[in-house]
């Protein structure tokens, strides 16, 4: 059995890294007016910045095929954003907001969304000090039925609270959130969500409910554009990573080695692994968004871990954030061997899907295994996502972001896009 000692790993990584990476080195001035508060009327008319071997050009996203070869394999994250923000009121009329993060106890999010009558979730609590032991209640009409929803806090953790939700009626928790919840816009979008966000803060190919933040690079795709890309010879391959609120968690420590990376769940099919293996080295692999990129890279290391730990039984494989950095000899494992390891793991369990948890942090010193390029949006200063971008661009990330700011690009979730070529 493999046991993870976080403090030991941190000590090891502190001594093995070539240099201590300061998060302040990945800061940049971001004026409030550069943050897009709303999407453009047409998804694929956002601006597109293309960074290729130090050269920067710009176009519109609708013309992205001009910058990709016909044999491109686009990796999409087909997760679906849930209306994770719920508002309750105390008997004193004090407003309590609950932001649902994930099921408590690492339960399967698909099963939890389908659960009826009661669930237990980790939540962020707005106005927490005003909420003591009182059970909160709100009413909603679903399919003509009057549903009473109750929320009770059962535990306060270091970074969130554990909330019991219960309700009457034969409806699922997904239906409860859809009826009562609000779209969980990122904290830097300083406005309340409206009806348009239910559509626009969702990719057109979203399928599996479970994210509390959108894989925003995919927001630029439209169905006509995807059909056009397919006609040009490109192929789409979906995976699922449910994006957690931790994606917005700033790095508050001076050095990135002191930052605890959030955990997220990946789900891929046997067909995905087989096709990815077939395409590796043959097609131009382009993940759409940092979530897709992080998922691909996590699969490599998870495959290696499965080779090292054959007695994992039915536990969900977990990739710790510093695992890839502890032994540089591991980077010599062929990618197809790592994918074969995952495939064999599924076959032994007679399963057509592979689910794992990843806390992988991709640092500026990390060397990508899969992507030939990355489609992404622009990210917050001093964020782990910007560290990932730096692993692709090196210090020229500063030139890319300076260009975007000086040429009226709209930044962050509802902002413009970029295509980053990997040398």
Image (cartoon, rainbow, N blue to C red):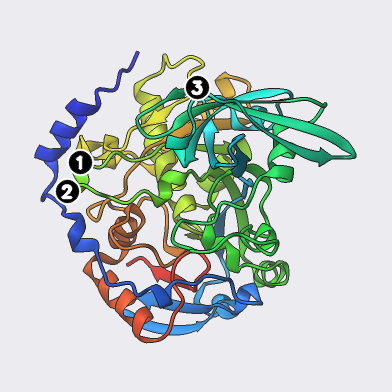
Q: Is residue 196 above or below residue 12?
A: below
Q: Position of residue 12 (x, y in %)?
A: 14, 33
Q: Position of residue 266 (x, y in %)?
A: 51, 38
Binning the other alpha carbons within 10 Å of mark 2 as few (below 14), some (14 to 19) or many (20 upward) gives some
* Of callouts 2 and 3, the N-terminal one: 3
Binning the other alpha carbons within 10 Å of mark 1 as few (below 14), some (14 to 19) or many (20 upward) gives few
Q: Secondary structure at mark 1?
A: helix
Residue beneath the point at 42% across and 62% down: 372
Q: Check disc 3 and report the residue beneath it.
A: 105
Left or right, 14 with respect to 2, comes to left
Quadrant including the C terminus? bottom left
- Residue 258's disc number: 1
Q: Secondary structure at mark 2?
A: loop
- Residue 160's disc number: none
User: Splitting the image into 4 quarters, where does residue 242 fall?
Assistant: top right
Q: Check disc 2 and report the residue beneath it.
A: 255
In the foreground, 19 or 36? 36
> Are the residues at dot 2 and dot 1 in contact (C-beta closer than 8 Å)?
yes
Residue beneath the point at 29% across and 38% down: 260
In the foreground, 237 or 21? 21
In the foreground, 254 or 373? 254
Residue beneath the point at 43% across and 17% down: 312
Left or right, 209 with respect to 301, comes to right
């Amino acid at each position: 059995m493999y046991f993870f000692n976080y403090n030991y790993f941190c000590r090891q990584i502190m001594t093995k890294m070539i240099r201590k990476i300061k998060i302040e080195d990945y800061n940049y001035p971001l004026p409030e007016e550069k943050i897009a508060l709303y999407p453009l009327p047409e998804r694929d008319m956002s601006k597109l910045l293309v960074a290729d071997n130090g050269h920067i050009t710009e176009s519109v996203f609708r013309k992205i095929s001009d910058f990709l070869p016909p044999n491109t394999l686009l990796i999409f994250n087909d997760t679906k954003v849930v209306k994770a923000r719920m508002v309750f009121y105390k008997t004193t009329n004090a407003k309590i907001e609950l932001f649902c993060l994930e099921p408590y106890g690492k339960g399967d999010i698909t099963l939890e969304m389908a659960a009826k009558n009661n669930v237990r979730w980790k939540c962020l609590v707005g106005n927490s000090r005003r909420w003591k032991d009182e059970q909160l209640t709100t009413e909603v009409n679903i399919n003509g039925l009057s549903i009473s929803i109750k929320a009770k806090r059962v535990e306060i953790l270091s970074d969130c609270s554990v909330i019991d939700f219960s309700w009457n009626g034969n409806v699922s928790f997904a239906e409860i959130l859809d009826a009562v919840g609000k779209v969980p816009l990122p904290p830097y979008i300083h406005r309340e969500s409206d009806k348009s966000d239910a559509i626009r803060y969702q990719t057109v190919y979203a399928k599996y409910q479970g994210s509390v933040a959108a894989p925003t690079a995919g927001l630029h795709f439209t169905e006509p554009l995807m059909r056009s890309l397919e006609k040009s010879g490109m192929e789409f391959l979906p995976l699922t990573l449910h994006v957690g609120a931790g994606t917005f968690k700033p790095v508050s420590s001076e050095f990135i080695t002191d930052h605890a990376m959030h955990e997220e769940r990946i789900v891929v099919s046997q067909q995905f692994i087989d096709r990815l293996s077939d395409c590796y080295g043959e097609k131009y692999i382009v993940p759409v968004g940092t979530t897709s990129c992080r998922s691909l890279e996590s699969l490599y290391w998870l495959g290696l871990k499965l080779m090292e730990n054959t007695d994992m039984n039915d536990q969900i494989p977990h990739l710790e954030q510093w695992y890839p950095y502890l032994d540089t000899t591991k980077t010599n494992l062929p990618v197809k061997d790592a994918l074969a390891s995952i495939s064999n793991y599924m076959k032994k369990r007679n399963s057509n899907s592979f689910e794992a948890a990843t806390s992988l942090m991709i640092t500026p010193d990390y060397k990508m295994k899969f992507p030939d390029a990355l489609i992404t949006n622009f990210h917050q200063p001093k964020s782990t996502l910007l560290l990932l971008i730096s692993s692709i661009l090196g210090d020229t990330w500063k030139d890319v972001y300076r260009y975007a700011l000086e040429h009226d690009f709209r930044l962050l979730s509802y902002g413009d896009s970029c295509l980053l070529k990997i040398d």
